[in-house]
Amino acid sequence: MSNHPIDVHVGERLREARKEFGMSQTALGELVDLSFQQIQKYEKGKNRIGSSRLWEFCGILNQEITYFFEGLDDAPTAPIVDPDTRRTRTELAALIDAGIPPHVIGRFLALVRELKADHPAAE
């Protein structure tokens, strides 16, 4: 499993902010009750930084939350959520309630996405 590019980017920005602030990984870790190894994992994008932890880093390193996302090339310009999400979630819940295992539902959805990609709907 590879690291997600956004996690890598946010980690790199954490490293930049920490260095600009003149703080070691050990010192930052002590302030948030983590080991320097965990800070290393964050900075390399190996572990995702939770929103509450990122908020703590903002306060410690005197950065706006947006600092960590600056420079991302493919920032979403439209909502990621599909307008039919409510219906889709209801349908998925019904499948789970019917006893269909989640891994089977996942494979079914992958097949549907593949078929849709092979046969795009006319607009």
Image (cartoon, helix red, strand yellow):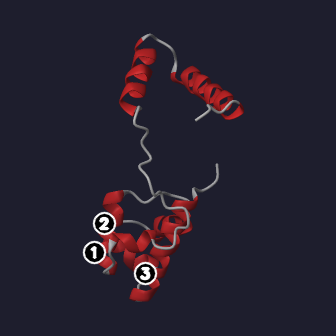
Residue 54 in percent (x, y) is at 36, 65
Residue assigned mark 2: 55
Residue assigned mark 3: 18
Q: Quadrant of residue 22?
A: bottom left
Tell me what residue is drawn at x 51 percent, y 23 percent. Answer: 102
Relative vertical location of residue 56 with respect to residue 22 in this rendering, above or below:
above
Distance from disc 3 to disc 1, alpha carbons, whole Å, reads 12 Å
Q: For the residues labelled 3 and 1, say whether their Cβ atoms are less than 8 Å apart.
A: no
Q: Which numbered mark, 2 or 3, is in the foreground of this view?
A: 2
Tell me what residue is drawn at x 62 percent, y 26 percent. Answer: 112
Mark 1: amino acid: Gly
List the single residue furthest toward the top. 98
Mark 3: amino acid: Arg
Tell me what residue is drawn at x 49 percent, y 61 percent. Answer: 75
Mark 3 residue element: helix
Between residues 64 and 20, which one lies in front from this camera angle? 64
Of marks 3 and 1, which one's residue comes earlier in the chain?
3
Relative vertical location of residue 95 with respect to residue 43 in this rendering, above or below:
above
Q: Badge 2, how many Cα within 10 Å: few under 14, some, many 20+?
A: some
Residue assigned mark 1: 59
Between residues 74 and 119, which one lies in front from this camera angle? 119
Residue 44 in percent (x, y) is at 56, 67
Tell me what residue is drawn at x 61 percent, y 31 percent. Answer: 121
Residue 106 in percent (x, y) is at 57, 27
Q: Quadrant of residue 107?
A: top right
